Amino acid sequence: MKIAKFKLVMFSVTLIIGWVFCLPALGQVQTPALEEELVYRLNVFNGRGYGGEFTPQSEDTIYLIADKNNAISARITLVCFWPITGKYQASFGTLNEEVEGVLEILKGEKVIETLEKEDNCLYHPEGYWAGVSVLYRGEEAWAYHEKYKKAIAEYYMKRSEYQQAQIEYRKKYNEFSKEIKKRKEAGEEITEEEAQQMMPKPPSPPRSPGFFVPPPGKDYIINLPPGNYKIRLRVENGAIIQDSEKNLVLFTYRREGGTGYTIIPGNRWTKRESCDDSSWIIYAAGKNTLYFNPFIQDEYNELYYNKLEEPQNTGREEKWKWVRTEPIKNVTLLFSKGKEILQKIVIAPYCVKQIYGPELGYEIVEWDPKEMPGRLPAFGGYKLELAFTLPKTNYEVNLQEKEGGLFPGGRREVRLVRKERAKSLYILSIFPLAVGLVVFVGRRRKMK
């Protein structure tokens, strides 16, 4: 008991001393200072669609993909350095002042283009969150936005009709239930088939527009061949706007049209793996389920592409990275051993169901719209099941087109590894520790 009380007292003293030393430090913590800056807001092509970030004054270069429409605009906003992320953050919600002027593009010291702002917008054919988008300019941008507004108006009109139909359906269903009850009480036998024929059919809800088009805005549209340029803003009186000068790098891919895979392991579906290069090998152990998603991909310089997606990112100029541009459709996944095809797999949508109880987990099931009304699939993929009974040897996956030929670059080697002798690896890893322990004990004895 005395020992326990002594420990409690010491813990309390330590806690008090900690507070004494920490409170002054906490008092010195300040909110990062906001400063007005001219920044460039970006809405640029990333190989598959468009993404937006901003370039602060700390970055002297803007990176864009060549021969594509890229929208940029100059803004005055509040910027602060955020130590947690090590990056500058902009507060466009507090200040977002548009900078007027013309954008000059220079090659060397010569002005090669002078750009005025023009109307533009993004067309998202598969919805805003799908990541696929196309930039339209001028009258075409307004035409697509009007098309979207018309589709939304029609949807809400059908939605109103659907809600009214729901009210009518409930009335008819109540009348149907009363009729069935009345006839059963009168001793009349009603078959299930007859009841199904009498039952009113519920109305189908309208589908919302599958695409999205925001209102057009005004930006400078840059579309240039690969090379190094400079940009700056000039006002009507001929003066160059302070802090508007930036270097401009237009780059393109080194290789295009490659085939890559995203692989979703069945036992940890949120952690997706990539297999981008045909020389890479897929390793699997024991019973396993893998969901494959094939993509077309292009290869870009790592530094340039990282800076394109986020101007404050880092990267290595000597390295290259694959970037997925679009999914590969209308193919069959082949799983084979040598020349023998073991499985032919078609793509299917899947849902993730939570398993409740003492052991929390999840189950991946094929999505069925009839059994899962109102629920959308979590992902789609080609489901490859690897059983325990498969010999531990080398296999391969490939993609077969509808015509019967193989899709270029789709082959990947799959190796099944053994787990039954995995414990021997732990023994080997302990061996250096054992040797070190023997040496340590021996030296201690010599010192004594």
Image (cartoon, rainbow, N blue to C red):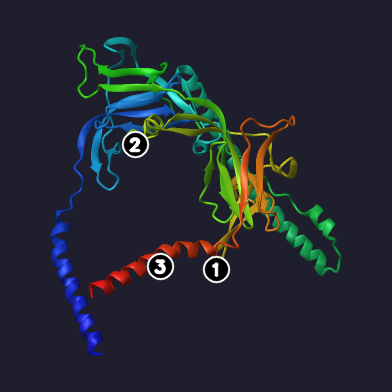
Mark 2 residue crowding within 10 angstroms, few (<14) / some (14–19) / many (20+): few
| Spatial separation of the CA atoms under disc 2 and disc 1 | 41 Å
Q: Evaluate whether residue 307 shows in this view.
A: yes
- 426 vs 277: above or below: below
- 123 vs 434: above or below: above
The residue that disc 1 covers is 359
User: Which label's residue is closer to the chain start, 3 or 2?
Assistant: 2
Tell me what residue is drawn at x 36 percent, y 65 percent.
436
Query: Looking at the figure, which quarter contains the C terminus?
Result: bottom left
Could you tell me which secondary element the residue under label 3 belongs to?
helix
The percent position of residue 293, horizontal first and vertical second, equals: 60, 41
Q: Evaluate whether residue 214 shows in this view.
A: no
User: Which label's residue is closer to the chain start, 3 or 1?
Assistant: 1
- 148 vs 192: above or below: above
Identify which amino acid the numbered label 1 is placed on. Glu
Tell me what residue is drawn at x 49 percent, y 33 percent.
323
Which of 89 and 141 lies nearest the eye of the viewer? 89
Taking 448 as reference, is 319 left or right? right
The residue that disc 3 covers is 434
| Spatial separation of the CA atoms under disc 3 and disc 2 | 42 Å
Q: Quadrant of residue 61?
A: top left
The residue lying furthest to the bottom in this view is: 1
The percent position of residue 324, horizontal first and vertical second, equals: 52, 34
